[in-house]
Image (cartoon, helix red, strand yellow):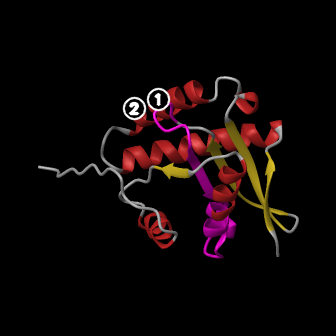
Amino acid sequence: METYLRPMTPAEYGQWVSSMEDGYAAGIAGSGSMSADAARAKARTETTQLLPDGLATEGQLLFRVVAGEQGVGWLWLATPHSVRDPGMAWVYDISVDETCRGRGYGKQIMLLAEREARAHGMTSIGLNVFGQNTVARSLYDSLGYQVTSQQMKKTL
């Protein structure tokens, strides 16, 4: 079954942005770097800064991932991401719908993200992943992503 990207609709954007912020806040809090309330505020602030015009924000590509006729996930890709590296795209969010996990869609979405980045003239792609997200880290390792920075913490 073919998996492909299609632009999010306005109704999907409303559903996705709320879920994405919840997931991002959970990842921040789960890393131990701040409380759940502070993480939620950070997620909301960063989303507002990065997507000031929602779906119409320039350079931000927001997709529903579809397999056959079924929505299976979401992708937020920025092109370009940085003035320091104008050839680098950035994956801000990749998610597979809960009922579709464990079927290889995460890998397919990342390959689609790479293809989309190339189509926009990008020469590299970056992302952040929380240390406790071992499933995602394993996926990125398997696709050839390399660690470029790492933060560590020890609770005393």
Whether residue 61 is situated above or below residue 57 in the rendered picture = below
Q: Residue furthest left?
A: 156
Magenta span: 82-110
Q: Is residue 53 left or right of residue 71?
A: left
Mark 2: which amino acid? Ala
Query: Is mark 1 in CB contact (under 8 Å) with mark 2?
Result: yes
Q: Residues within 10 Å of mark 2 (few under 14, many from 20)?
A: some
Tell me how many marks there are.
Answer: 2
State the image quarter where residue 90 is shown: top right
Q: Is residue 43 left or right of residue 134?
A: right
At 67% from the left edge and 53% from the top edge, which residue is drawn? Answer: 118
Magenta-span inclusion, residue 93: yes
Q: Position of residue 146 (x, y in %)?
A: 40, 61
At 58% from the left edge and 29% from the top edge, which residue is drawn? Answer: 50
Mark 1: which amino acid? Ala
**Residue named by callout 2:** 38
Q: Quadrant location of the N terminus?
A: bottom right
Along the viewing direction, whichever of 3 and 148 lies nearer the viewer: 148
**Residue named by callout 1:** 41
State the image quarter where residue 102 is shown: bottom right
Separation of residues labelled 1 and 2 (CA atoms): 5 Å
Q: Residues within 10 Å of mark 1 (few under 14, many from 20)?
A: some
Helix, strand or loop at disc 2? helix
Q: Residue furthest right?
A: 69
Q: Position of residue 114 (x, y in %)?
A: 63, 58
At 72% from the left edge and 51% from the top edge, which residue is drawn? Answer: 119
Whether residue 75 is situated above or below residue 15 in the rendered picture = below
Q: Position of residue 35 (x, y in %)?
A: 34, 38
Residue 144 — which label? Answer: none
Helix, strand or loop at disc 1? helix
